[in-house]
Image: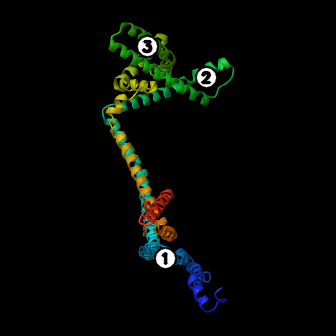
């Protein structure tokens, strides 16, 4: 077009379409098509958007200059026009500085995140390494604090397990003979001992439970309850003496024969008497030492009504306080991550928005003589919704028309 014109027309066309003279060279330089990859990448990152905004501003400048003749308040219009170009320059430098700021904020956030990860792994390793010590400490605090008799509970359970194990080995031959006579076939001893052990464990725990209930009845001095629980206790005594302790005494008969030259005859009365005394001694000793405190706790755990006193007296409010501190720490970490994410996203969005806002100012200035955005942008809150921008533009245009 310029080559075909000559003389004054060439000068006029050159002034009216002056961006054509350099825009292609600017774009080729900003794209860096003939440069190395990293040079082209840097040019496109730092120069492409500013070059596009400058070309757009140059094209908008043409109708703005031509419209000066027809506009009212030309002085104000021209001054504002130069300020729009000044804002574009500030936006370009803010764009470059914003990219560097974004890289700095991103590197800082990554370093802090890596630091938190390393510290978290280190704390986790410490927790895993010191968890046995912490468990022992918590166990000691729970044991020796007033509230729940953990020692009595553990000793009661251990004693029931020992007694069940002993009577399992003692009564296994009798049970095997009984089941073999009923089924007419042999039964594996290893297969029989597991259910027999569980059965005896429940039987012994039930014996202590009956004894604990009888003790409570004696303490309350309710005659009717004492008689009923006493009968149940006698039945429990009869069952354990006949089926468990009798076998235990029978297993001691060879030892009696060894020390009496084989002339020893114990008889059923002596066997039952020794078995009853053994039951009474074992139950009395274990009851006085630990079972009187451990058995009610076991019953309360089974019934689901346990540990109300221990929950307040034993551990106090320490678990609750620890839980609150943990929740507070998690909340603080979440708020920090959210704040840092907003900071990184703001640093990422603001640099290109500087250029876009300056370019939009040129377009709106052409029609309303008023720029919409204040350059440079310092935070995302300066960019309101599109509806708010339209309302501001329309209200500014109406004020200009009234003036």
Classify residue 145 as left or right of residue 372: left
Give the alpha-carbon distance from disc 2 to disc 1, as whole Å: 116 Å
Give the alpha-carbon distance from disc 3 to disc 1, as whole Å: 114 Å
The residue sitting at 43% across, 15% down in the picture is 276
Quarter holding the C terminus?
Answer: bottom left
Give the alpha-carbon distance from disc 2 to disc 3, as whole Å: 28 Å
Residue 163 seen by the camera:
yes
Residue 260 screen position, x and y as percent? 45, 19
Name above or below for residue 324 compared with residue 285.
Answer: below
Outermost residue, bottom side: 7
Quarter holding the N terminus?
Answer: bottom right
Classify residue 60 as left or right of residue 89: right
Mark 1 Cα within 10 Å, few/some/many (few <14, many 20+)? some
* In-front residue for pair 114/141: 114
Q: Which mark is residue 176?
A: 2
Q: Which mark is residue 68?
A: 1
Residue 226 screen position, x and y as percent? 38, 10
Q: Quadrant of residue 111?
A: bottom left
| Residues at discs 2 and 3 in contact (Cβ within 8 Å) | no
Find numbered disc 1 in the image and state the secondary structure of the residue it sits on. helix
Residue at which label 3 appears? 233
Sequence-earlier tag: 2 or 3: 2
Sequence-earlier tag: 2 or 1: 1
Find numbered disc 2 in the image and state the secondary structure of the residue it sits on. helix
Callout count: 3
Residue 171 screen position, x and y as percent? 54, 23
* In-front residue for pair 31/148: 31
* In-front residue for pair 351/234: 351
Sequence-earlier tag: 3 or 1: 1
Q: Nearer the viewer, mark 3 or mark 1?
A: 1
Outermost residue, right side: 184
């Amino acid at each position: 077009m310029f080559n075909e014109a000559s003389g004054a027309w060439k000068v006029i066309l050159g002034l009216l379409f002056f961006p054509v003279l350099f825009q292609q060279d600017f774009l080729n330089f900003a794209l860096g098509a003939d440069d190395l990859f990293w040079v082209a990448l840097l040019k496109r990152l730092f120069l492409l958007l500013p070059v596009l905004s400058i070309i757009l501003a140059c094209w908008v400048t043409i109708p703005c200059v031509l419209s000066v003749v027809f506009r009212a308040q030309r002085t104000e219009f021209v001054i504002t026009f130069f300020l729009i170009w000044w804002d574009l320059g500030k936006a370009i430098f803010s764009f470059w500085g914003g990219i560097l700021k974004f890289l700095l904020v991103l590197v800082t956030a990554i370093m802090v995140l890596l630091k938190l990860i390393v510290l978290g792994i280190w704390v986790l390793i410490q927790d895993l390494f010191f968890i046995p010590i912490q468990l022992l400490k918590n166990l000691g605090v729970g044991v020796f604090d007033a509230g729940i008799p953990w020692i009595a509970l553990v000793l009661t359970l251990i004693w029931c397990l020992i007694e069940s194990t002993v009577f399992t080995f003692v009564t296994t031959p009798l049970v095997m003979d009984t089941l073999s006579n009923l089924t007419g076939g042999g039964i594996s001893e290893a297969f029989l001992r597991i259910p027999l052990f569980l059965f005896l464990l429940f039987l012994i725990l039930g014996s202590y439970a009956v004894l604990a209930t009888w003790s409570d009845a004696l303490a309350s001095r309710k005659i009717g309850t004492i008689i009923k629980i006493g009968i149940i206790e006698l039945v429990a005594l009869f069952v354990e003496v006949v089926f468990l302790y009798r076998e235990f005494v029978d297993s001691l008969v060879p030892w009696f024969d060894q020390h009496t030259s084989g002339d020893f005859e114990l008889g059923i009365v002596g066997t039952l008497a020794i078995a009853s005394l053994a039951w009474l001694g074992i139950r009395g000793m274990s009851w006085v030492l630990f079972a009187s405190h451990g058995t009610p706790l076991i019953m309360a755990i089974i019934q689901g009504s346990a540990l109300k006193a221990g929950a307040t007296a034993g551990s106090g409010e320490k678990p609750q306080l620890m839980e609150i501190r943990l929740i507070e720490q998690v909340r603080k970490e979440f708020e920090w991550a959210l704040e840092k994410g907003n900071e990184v996203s703001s640093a990422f969005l603001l640099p290109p928005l500087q250029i876009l806002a300056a370019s939009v100012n040129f377009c709106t200035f052409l029609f309303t003589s008023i720029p919409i955005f204040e350059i440079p942008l310092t935070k995302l809150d300066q960019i309101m919704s599109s509806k708010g921008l339209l309302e501001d533009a329309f209200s500014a245009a109406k004020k200009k028309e009234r003036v």
